[in-house]
Amino acid sequence: MRKSHPVRRAVLAGAATVSGIVLLLSLKPASDPGSAQAAGGQLPPAAAGQAPQGGVNGAVTGDAAQTQYGPVQVRVTMSNGKITKAEAVQTPKGGQSDQITANAVPRLNQAAVAAQSADIDAVSGATYTSAGYKKSLQSALDKAKASAGAAQGGGAGTARTVTGDVAQTQYGPVQVRITVAGGKITKAEAVQAPKGGRSDQITSSSVPRLNQAAVATGTAQIDSVSGATYTSAGYKKSLQSALDKAPSGGGSSQAAGEGGGREQTGTGTFTGSVAQTEYGPVQVRITVAGGKITKAEAVQAPKGGRSDQITSSSVPRLNQAAVATGTAQIDSVSGATYTSAGYKKSLQSALDQAGG
């Protein structure tokens, strides 16, 4: 049997040693907990639309998302910045929609809580409902994020973006988004406006002028654009809704006390989301002072034919009941079942915004 040469053994041993050192140096210390934390390995990934982690507590209702089969609106309950509950306060109804809603919404609710964001999968067979749900859920999370920023005491120069409720017009929906900094509107834009045919021309002509007017005045008390009456009215209605939601100032009718914004004073004007009823939309605006409702009014109510009589009889009584109870747990007015139900739904939305 041949014996290995001593020099050859030495060369082989040296090569093995060098290879071992190179291999050790190339290993990544992935198991080092200190390194993993420094690199962010133990932190959850930041996803778009993730629930704000700023100690947000309470219920927040997203804007109603219009779908081909009806509106979808989501309300989330937050605890320390996390979604603890999600529910659909409006969903498509009638015919096959009832079955689709009953099957899809519970699964979407569960997904929202599990994902802690609006980045959830659509439910098979409920494409439109799922899309509307995610849009309204994102709106609720945006509102919670804005509320968290305000509660953390952002400085006067901190800019916040607020989206108003959709205002339905004869020619299509109008929805306004504003940026508020230092209690003033610094930017206004229409995220929805009438489209198609002559509406395109009217929109392109009127919306920029309405945006400029909103920034210039800092309020919704702006002049209508000639030839764009319906678009102007919808713009002002949605703009007022955005101002009502704005955490501070911005031309809204809230009265801030010495302590600052509405989170500390419990004072301000809040417009609820539109509640669709069989006879038309209902939308409620409340004024809150010292944590109590001092005024309630319906800014939208069913109109035309017998609805005019029912509205004129029931709405004042509903307004009084809202002020008297300070909640949405009010009795329906006899003979105005649908209007009462819509009123209470929109009132609850306004109270959610007020933090009540």
Image (spheres, helix red, strand yellow):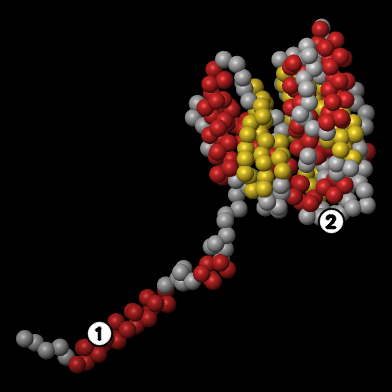
Q: What residue type is labelled 2?
A: Gly
Image quadrant in which the C terminus is located: top right
Position in image of residue 323 (x %, y %): 87, 30
Q: Which residue is drawn at 54% across and 62% down?
A: 42
The circle drawn on residue 337 is none
Q: What residue type is labelled 1?
A: Leu
Position in image of residue 351 (x %, y %): 78, 35
Is 13 positioned to the left or the right of 248 in the image? left
The residue at which mark 1 appears reads as: 12
Image quadrant in which the N terminus is located: bottom left
Q: Residue furthest left?
A: 1
Whether residue 354 is visible here, answered yes or no, is yes
Q: Which residue is drawn at 11% across and 89% down?
A: 3
Using the image as rendered, state which of residue 27 and residue 204 is in the foreground: 27
Q: At numbered mark 2, what does the secondary structure look like: helix, strand or loop?
A: loop
Calculate the distance from the C-alpha at mark 1 to the C-alpha at mark 2.
69 Å
The residue at which mark 2 appears reads as: 155
